[in-house]
Amino acid sequence: MLPQSPPPPQSPSATPKARIKMIVAWTVGLALLAWLLSHTPFSEVREAITRPSIGIWALTLCGLLLSYGLRAARLQVVLALDDHTRAPRRWLGLRTDSLRVILMHNAAVNLLPMRAGELSFPWLASRELNLPLPRAVACLLWMRVQDLIVLVTLGVLLWPGVPLVWRAAALAAMVLGWWMVSWGMRLWYGQHPESSATAPTAPTPPAGKVTQVLQRLRHALLEPAHHRPMAWLLTLANWSVKLAAGACLLSAISGSNWGTAWSGALGGELAAVVPLQGPAGFGTYEAGVWAGMAAHLSATSPALALAVSAALALHVCFLLCAVFAGALAWLLSQLPSSPSPQRGHPPRGTP
């Protein structure tokens, strides 16, 4: 039986190899940001912040806050929290414990380089939701798979200017790719039946990193709550709202049409897939936004000239909102709470 509150995960900078990776990530991210800003006068960056109206800023902020609520709702569904434990409190139907985990985890992901903030999720889920570490790791892995699938699907369906036949071909390729990956995993699991009893975080041989990932993915795929249709709908709603909010601000600053701005917002989010991430994602996010908008604008377009400053303004907005919301959630978690309601059995799938 795992302890209720295990110690926090080891710091990502605890080993020399990790320190080198972090230094490289910071260097690449800051160098990329410096290169982008060298082509963008600071006067334009200052103007980008003041150009949108108060209404546009408010709309962007409301969309971002709504996306936080949708993420918390998805966490409730993916973990089947209401099936096993009573909520300490609810705000507009959202469990406050689930919302705290999402807000603090989101702040950590936004602040730390190399996606190191992801390591906070197992510890937060264990502390706030009484969740065993293996279950939390499997949940995080599954949510990231869902995020990637939904983002790519939105890109295929809504990327401006793509002929219908190409969209259909891309969707067919995605379905075929998913089937092939599933077939390959079923084949591997059939050859390693003993893996069914292995916890997702169990130690593996020195050369077994791929095996460890497959074990965790197996555990994530076997959890029934992960495949609930509502989890997919909430993931789709979350990304649709966040991308729309970002596109609204990008369009207001750059003067581009909404479809081009939406492509820029999508490009910025997909840039998170890049292995090297600078501090707070600076550099890679702006490059992703610029690339998404450049796909639809000429090199001499005034809107493209403002793309980097618009991306920087949007990124700072997202970062400040994430940090403020995470800090507020942390402060609320430190306040004395009312007597905890009786907890049920641990979630299904707990090893």
Image (spheres, rainbow, N blue to C red):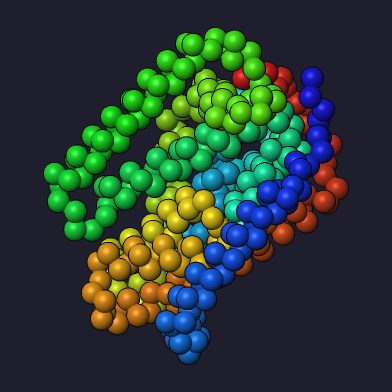
Q: In the rendered view, would you say 243 is above or below 73? A: below
Q: Is residue 119 visible?
A: yes
Image height of 62 relative to 198, above or below: below
Asked if residue 239 lies left or right of residue 330, the reply is left
* Closer to us: 314 or 215: 215
Which residue is painted at 68% across and 48% down in the image?
17
For the point 19% across and 58% down, the residue is 161
Quadrant location of the N terminus in the rendered image: top right
Residues 332 and 177: in front is: 177
Left or right of 157? Residue 93 is right
The image quadrant where one finds the C terminus is top right
Q: How many marks?
A: 0
Outermost residue, bottom side: 43
Q: Position of residue 263 (x, y in %)?
A: 33, 60
Residue at (60%, 27%) from the top-left corner?
208
Tell me: residue 243, above or below residue 164: below
Q: Residue at x 70, y 31 (%)?
A: 133
Residue 259 location, x and y as percent? 28, 63
Residue 238 % position (x, y): 46, 48
Residue 314 visible in this rendered orientation of the protein:
no
Q: x, y percentage for residue 68?
A: 55, 52
